[in-house]
Amino acid sequence: ELKVATGVSELGLLSFLEEKGAFSTLESVGAFSTAEKLLPVIEDLKVLSLLESTLDVEAGLLFTAANWLLVATPVYITLAICGFAPIPEGPFIALDAVVGLGLTTVGVLLFAWAFVVSKLQED
């Protein structure tokens, strides 16, 4: 609600620090300029609000959900190889690949998110 990330972006605070050489290693790769451009997007997507709301959820539950997402594709492939699930054919191969990649990607992101939440819940 305070739009802090947008304010930091509009003030050019990170670019100022980059110009002064305060963070020379990150400066050499232009990380601050990139981060500054992403701050309004992060704010629009309500990423920080989501993180705040997940602090009330036990990190173990988030890890469990992430692990289920990570293991879904390998389990399906194993079941298909053993004959317990249909093996996709034709155009469905691409669809299954996209779904499998999507589940794995969401699982990795949720696992990282759960790790951050677990570190914040330690206090």
Image (spheres, rainbow, N blue to C red):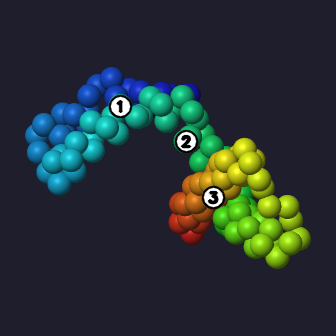
Along the line of sight, the residue nearer the viewer: 19 or 3 = 19
- Which badge, 3 or 1, is on the more N-terminal residue? 1
Label 2 packing within 10 angstroms: few (<14), some (14-19), many (20+): few
Q: Secondary structure at mark 1?
A: helix
Q: CA distance from mark 2 to mark 1?
A: 16 Å
The mark found on residue 119 in the picture is none
- Please name the residue shown 77% across and 72% down the image: 81
Disc 3, SS: helix
- What residue is pinned by disc 1? 37
Badge 1: few (under 14), some or many (20 or more) residues near its Cα, within 10 Å? some
Could you tell which of marks 2 and 3 lies nearer the N-terminus? 2
Q: Is residue 108 above or below residue 16?
A: below
CA gap, disc 2 and disc 3: 23 Å
Instruction: Nearest to the eye among marks 2 and 1: give it.
Output: 1
Q: Position of residue 6 (x, y in %)?
A: 41, 27
In percent of the image, x 77 and y 66: which residue is there? Answer: 76
- In this orientation, does residue 41 appear? yes
Secondary structure of the residue carrying numbered label 2: helix
Question: As shown in the figure, which amino acid type bears the numbered disc 2?
Answer: Leu
Q: Residue at x 86, y 65 (%)?
A: 85
Q: Residue at x 56, y 64 (%)?
A: 115
Label number found at residue 104:
3
Give x and y (percent) for residue 20.
Answer: 11, 40
Q: Is residue 89 left or right of residue 116?
A: right
Q: In the image shown, does 68 or 97 lie closer to the viewer?
A: 97
Q: Could you tell me the amino acid type at mark 1?
A: Lys
The numbered mark at residue 48 is: 2
